[in-house]
Amino acid sequence: MSSWGIVGAGAWGTALALFAHRAGHEVRLWGRDPARLQEIVARRENPRLPGFPIPEAIGLADDPSMPEAEFLLLAVPVQHFRAVAGAVVPSGRPLVAAAKGMEAGTGLMPLEILAAVHPGAPTGVLTGPNFAAEIAAGLPAASVLAAADGGVRKTLLAALSGPGLRLYGNADPLGAQVGGAAKNVIAIAAGAVIGAGWGENARAALVTRGLAELSRLTVGLGGRLETSFGLSGLGDLVLTCTGRASRNFRYGWALGRGERPAVEGVAEGVATAPALVARAEGAGCEVPVAGAVARLLAGETTLGEAMAELLARPQRDE
């Protein structure tokens, strides 16, 4: 049995807490918003994850460091990741990023932020094709624990494994994080074409070409090509671009219908799109689909114009 400290009481953090409790671990949960945390205390249910009672055995913490925990899982949106990570005292414990995206302005991914805030701390990233409600319900799933240090990876794989969730280790945390960031941007494009009524052919084309962009960027930034075709790349891309539970897909779907997106929670792809394009440009990688999404979100093009530009690109071999 392990002692988990989960930093972030949104839907994903709560789902992880429920999974850990079900696996027999000790769990404490901390949230950024004191009012929401008090609501969770009163209702023993998170409004972001309705229908899943939070057992009394899951403690709610007032200190994000949770010194009694053997490791900390940071499940907060990437745009708040630096501030929350800075409030945590690592004390030599592994810090596990359970967030996907790139920080606006810097383009940094979660483990890069942790390296800047807590240099030398042991770190890993938990990522993959997982919807929070399905993990909370105990439905079968698989995920990736990526860490460059083999010892840290082995320790975390043993501590985080449990019934219903098969974990795979990966020695390429950079590539795993690129997949988690890029898939959210591509999902906005996939949602937009479905919302606009342009059909499944268009979605399939965008997902496939999005995978090509994700792979190029992974290699361009120093990751491994094969990571792109695993759970943290292709697996997460397929789920996010086809599942209506995806906030990024729903955001794009609303754009495609000409509506104002109203998505509960955070659509990470919105802030990640321009950051990803900037990092791709710095690495000399072409990312036309991500670029079109970034321009669309910035109001620099319309959906119709963006699709016309993509279809008019010079012909080439695949």
Image (spheres, rainbow, N blue to C red):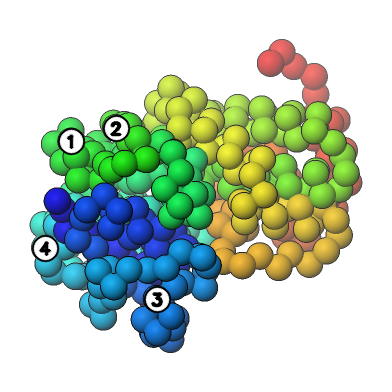
Front-lying residue, 234 or 302: 234
**Eyeballing the image, is 67 above or below 113?**
below
Tell me, for residue 91, which label it has, or none. 4
Q: Distance of mark 3 from mark 1, alpha carbons?
A: 33 Å
Q: Residues within 10 Å of mark 4 (few under 14, many from 20)?
A: few
Q: Mark 3 or mark 4: which comes first in sequence?
A: 3
- Disc 2 designates what residue? 169
**Eyeballing the image, is 77 above or below 246?**
below
Q: Residue at x 64, y 44 (%)?
A: 243
- Disc 3 designates what residue? 44
In this rendering, which labeled residue sits more in front, label 2 or label 4? 2
Q: Residue at x 74, y 16 (%)?
A: 316
In this rendering, which labeled residue sits more in front, label 3 or label 2? 3
Q: Mark 2 or mark 1: which comes first in sequence?
A: 1
- Disc 1 designates what residue? 154
Q: Distance of mark 2 from mark 4, alpha carbons?
A: 24 Å
Query: Tag 2's secondary structure?
Result: strand
Q: Residue at x 84, y 36 (%)?
A: 199
Query: What amino acid is labelled 3 in the image?
Result: Arg
Q: Distance of mark 2 from mark 1, alpha carbons?
A: 8 Å
Query: Tag 3's secondary structure?
Result: loop
Front-lying residue, 108 or 201: 201
Front-lying residue, 143 or 283: 143
Disc count in the image? 4
Q: Is residue 24 visible?
A: yes
Classify residue 13 as left or right of residue 68.
right
